[in-house]
């Protein structure tokens, strides 16, 4: 059986996390793993810890190269990919795969896909999907042994100039994912700094909750989060619930006792990237990783699937037959849940009485997106992540269009509202005539006066990046 020589990587395309392009000829003698990914894809994000584990375990013998083959138009921009590398702490070289050239040369058909290239430059195997750490680990170990015996492996380490070394995250907030205005307070998921910031509406910081990456309960200073996202506040009991996304957990922040407790999840993927929360008669969870809506009974602590059969698709109907595609935002008016269904760039609704799922606007097609106002099916959004119900309307963070849009949940009418200054906004919240926006890639919270449409930027007194605070 003839072996397939790995197609060479383009040298004239943008490369990130390195000062110069890598060629397979240059890497001869090392095991190379190409990771075909796009930064919107939750499955692609799930494999990043596996890749980090492998590159640390075999740092002298493997080179991992991310081949970023964009799905959405917004993801084709090199600067946006660089921001994603910073957000997800990617530490291997990334090639910007323009027009799917490398994807096509390697006959890739799905995200994520891994191409394993042996030290002599031949494609050994390709693997598709997440959960491949053990398979990759075993294959690498066998390749090392085989090529040691043949004398065709070259043990050495390459020094990389990473994007995070060029641009350290020293801003007071880092990639804030969600924002919640409630009870005269502002709760900010400071996702890149792995903490929750609580302030009053003037920006006076009241609490900093979380001390770095991890899953640890305890007091506000000792507790740890991992890229938290959506939040829901129980005013009666003074409790904040947090979707601790990369810990695959739901956390309970008790302000009366200043304690953090894990109430669902273990840190493993038994829950699957909870991305947003809303409090109704139960806690409803947009479970992005498994394309479902879940519910958590806060009395019994029983957690289970509420809607969606788990297929990544857009299908209306009953709770059991419905399908979602990476739901990333959720809100309610008390009688219906509203979901920002990001991968189909659509707004969905779940009637809590009839338990029927509908599509309010957007095409519902995984490959149909854009920036088109209109009604119902004719609307085009681009990877919407944030949603908030207020006064009969839905406020949408149309993330990859860098806009805020307004949707009528009854008619499905969608209109652009604001697009002046945002970069991938991911969360929205309304209180007392102001719209608060998590302006994610700008690392700030915007405050919009809904009467005048004046956009301001929240200043948080004394807030700084965790490793860059000046102690007097």
Image (cartoon, rainbow, N blue to C red):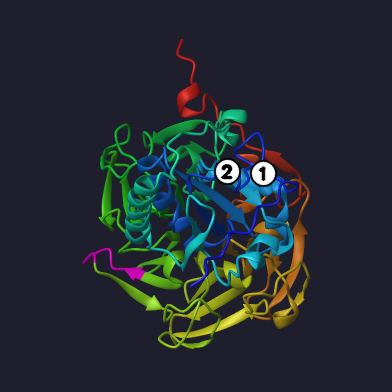
Q: How far apart are the alpha carbons under marks 1 and 2?
A: 7 Å
| Residues packed near mark 1 inside 10 Å, few (<14), some (14 to 19) or many (20 plus) | many
State the image quarter where residue 67 is shown: bottom right
User: Looking at the image, which residue is at 35% across and 61% down?
Assistant: 135
Instruction: Residue 53: give x, y in percent of width and height.
Output: 37, 46
Query: Which secondary structure is most common in the magenta stretch?
Result: loop
Q: Residue furthest top?
A: 472
User: Looking at the image, which residue is at 48% across and 73% down?
Assistant: 1
**Residue 434 shows in this picture:** no
Q: Is residue 413 left or right of residue 315?
A: right
Q: Is mark 1 on a helix, strand or loop?
A: strand
Instruction: Residue 125: give x, y in percent of width and height.
Output: 46, 65
Q: Is residue 106 left or right of residue 369?
A: left
| Residue toward you, 319 or 37 | 37
Q: Which residue lies furthest to the left in this view?
A: 300
Name the residue that disc number 2 marks. 93
Instruction: Residue 383: give x, y in percent of width and height.
Output: 63, 64
Q: Are marks 1 and 2 in contact (CB under 8 Å)?
A: yes
Which numbered marker is on residue 15? 1
Looking at the rendering, the stretch of residues picked out in magenta corresponds to 295-301
**Residue 243 shows in this picture:** yes
Instruction: Residue 226: give x, y in percent of width and height.
Output: 40, 45
Which numbered marker is on residue 138? none
Q: What element carries label 2?
A: loop
């Amino acid at each position: 059986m003839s072996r397939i020589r790995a197609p060479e990587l383009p040298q004239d395309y943008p490369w990130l996390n390195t000062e110069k392009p890598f060629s397979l000829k240059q890497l001869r003698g090392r095991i190379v793993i190409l990771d075909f990914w796009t930064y919107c894809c939750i499955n692609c994000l799930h494999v990043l810890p596996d890749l980090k584990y492998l590159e640390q375990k075999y740092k002298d013998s493997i080179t991992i190269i991310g081949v970023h083959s964009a799905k959405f138009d917004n993801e084709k921009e090199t600067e946006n990919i660089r921001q994603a590398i910073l957000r997800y702490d990617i530490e291997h070289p990334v090639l910007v795969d323009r027009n799917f050239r490398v994807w096509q040369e390697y006959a890739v058909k799905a995200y994520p896909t891994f191409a394993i290239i042996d030290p002599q430059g031949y494609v050994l195997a390709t693997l598709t999907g997440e959960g491949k750490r053990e398979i990759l680990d075993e294959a690498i170990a066998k390749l090392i042994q085989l090529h040691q015996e043949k004398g065709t492996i070259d043990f050495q380490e390459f020094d990389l100039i990473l994007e995070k070394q060029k641009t350290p995250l020293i801003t007071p907030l880092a990639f804030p994912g969600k924002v919640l205005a409630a009870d005269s307070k502002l709760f900010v998921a400071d996702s890149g700094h792995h903490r929750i910031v609580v302030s009053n509406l003037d920006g006076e910081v009241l609490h900093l909750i979380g001390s770095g990456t991890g899953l640890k309960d305890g007091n506000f200073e000792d507790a740890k989060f991992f890229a938290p996202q959506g939040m829901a506040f129980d005013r009666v009991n003074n409790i904040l619930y947090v979707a601790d996304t990369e810990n695959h957990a739901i956390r309970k922040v008790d302000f009366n006792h200043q304690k953090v407790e894990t109430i669902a999840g273990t840190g493993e993927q038994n829950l699957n990237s909870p991305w947003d929360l809303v409090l109704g008669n139960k806690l409803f969870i947009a479970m992005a990783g498994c394309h479902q809506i879940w519910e958590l009974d806060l009395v019994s602590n029983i957690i289970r699937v509420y809607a969606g059969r788990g297929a990544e698709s857009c299908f209306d109907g009953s709770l059991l037959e419905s399908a979602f595609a990476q739901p990333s935002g959720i809100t309610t008016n008390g009688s219906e849940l509203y979901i920002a269904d990001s991968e189909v760039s659509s707004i969905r609704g779940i009637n809590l009485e009839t338990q029927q799922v509908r599509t309010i606007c957007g095409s519902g097609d995984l490959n149909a997106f854009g920036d088109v106002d209109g009604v119902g099916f004719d609307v085009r959004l681009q990877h919407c992540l944030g949603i908030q119900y207020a006064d009969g309307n839905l406020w949408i963070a149309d993330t990859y269009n860098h806009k805020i849009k307004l949707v009528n949940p009854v008619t499905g009418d969608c209109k652009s509202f604001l697009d002046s200054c945002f970069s991938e906004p991911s969360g929205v919240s309304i209180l007392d005539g102001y719209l608060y926006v998590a302006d994610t890639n700008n690392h700030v919270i915007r405050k919009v006066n809904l009467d005048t449409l004046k956009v301001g930027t929240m200043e948080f007194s004394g807030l700084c990046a965790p490793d860059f605070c000046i102690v007097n």
